[in-house]
Image (spheres, rainbow, N blue to C red):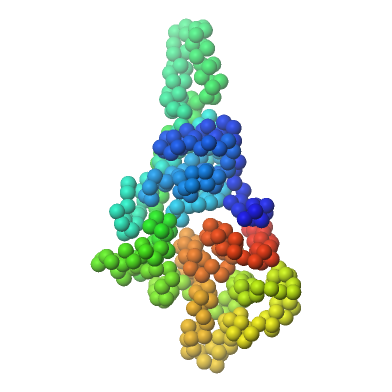
Amino acid sequence: MNKLKEENLYYPNAIPIKGFLVERYNKCLNLFGIKPTKLAYFTIDAKGWSPEIAKEKNNPFYLNNGEANPYAIIISPLQKEKEVFNAYYSYEKEMMKAIFNTYFQEIKDITKESALCIEFNQKIDVFYDCFDLLKYDTIFIEFHLINDIKNIKNEQLELEKNFLKGNNFVNEKLHQKILTSVLKYGDLRKRNLDLKPIEFKVNSFYTKAFGGVYIFKDFIQEMLVFENKETYHQAIKNETYQELIFYKDDLQLFDKLTDYVVVEINLDKLLQSERYQRIKKHIFAQLFSKTEHSMEQILDSDLLFKRYLNKLDLEGKKRIMTVERFSEILKENPNANIKDYIPNDILKALYAPHSSLLKEEIELVWKLLQKTTQKDPYFMYLYTPNTFYKAFYNYDESYQNWIIKYIKSKLKKL
């Protein structure tokens, strides 16, 4: 993991927090009923989540009050445009964008003296079963401020009011009160500190609750896809929603997603894509334990790639070229069934979100596909970074180097 850190690919561009900002952060934690951190230095993402504090507390979801109630902390306007590293709900990144787009000037003002403690309130205090997730419709983003700053603003307005009465403008004690307040808190009189809740509409989404669940709401029929097999088996016992429930590794899942116009395989488009070349190279890299050249050199050279391809046994060659071989078969037999020719693990990696989906639906489907197939490290990094970090640790060192170089080159173009 040190390699990723050195290349700024492990929780990249996080905001460093130290000094008086640590105190403000701890006040927010205290407001939420969470024990303060003992760290004098840590980093945060757009939501205010810190990987260092998560490690300290041995709790990756320390900014949650149970599965149904996530929180966020804003102590700097620099959090705008940053990533959400460990979202409990897939829509948290969009919620943070909505907050900054709505109240960016107010955030700049407030964080001069205070911090925003944010509650994502979906009017469900606790989950009784996974089907409560189908009730999600509107999230109310509610704001709380530390340091009692709203009352201090009211006190300053009252001081101003008294200052303008009669001959109070010569009252030295009143002068001193005003000066003390302004020096400590700044001039709050014209600051907008009363941030109205933002209503955020929720459609399909992913949550880490119940071991990880994808909720597809706006398709032919509502559907739940579970990452955790035990939770899936518990859910399938119900009598109401049985047709809606799938485990992520079910063979029937991709058939159902195809029927519901959620995913597709466009073979002609796929074969011309950079994504397919990444998938092919990943499969290739896993077939070799020792090579004369580094895997980094091989994957960057068409000549070396072909040379090592020809060193594989027949089954290895067929596995690497299975999609191209099926494409040739289709020319002679248009009715050939793709499932009869391409191994299931590779077949699942070929699916993509259907072209008719909305942007947020496309991102959700990519997230599901990367969790299910794990054969495209670049898309894993983009859509399921924590899954990528775990997988990266087990790759050959030379393949790790190639992935790092590839990801960095792609990120420069974004």
Compared with 55, 329 (above or below) is below
- Quarter-of-image position of residue 119: top left
Compared with 374, 55 (above or below) is above
In the picture as drawn, the residue positioned furthest to the bottom comes out as: 332
Residue 182 in sight here:
yes
Give me the residue at 50% from left, 8% from top.
173
Compared with 380, 47 (above or below) is above
Give me the residue at 46% from left, 72% from top.
263
Decide if residue 339 is on the left or right side of residue 272: left
- Asked whether 157 or 363 is in front, the reply is 363
Decide if residue 404 is on the left or right side of residue 253: right
Measured as percent of width and height from the top left, residue 34 is found at 43, 39
Pick the quarter of the image with the C terminus: bottom right
Measured as percent of width and height from the top left, residue 222 is found at 34, 65
Compared with 339, 298 (above or below) is above
- Asked whether 166 or 12 is in front, the reply is 12
In the picture as drawn, the residue positioned furthest to the left comes out as: 239
Residue 273 in sight here:
no
Pick the quarter of the image with the N terminus: bottom right
Q: How many marks?
A: 0
Measured as percent of width and height from the top left, residue 403 is found at 65, 64
Give me the residue at 55% from left, 93% from top.
332
Measured as percent of width and height from the top left, residue 19 is found at 59, 32
- Asked whether 8 or 392 is in front, the reply is 392
Give me the residue at 27% from left, 65% from top.
238
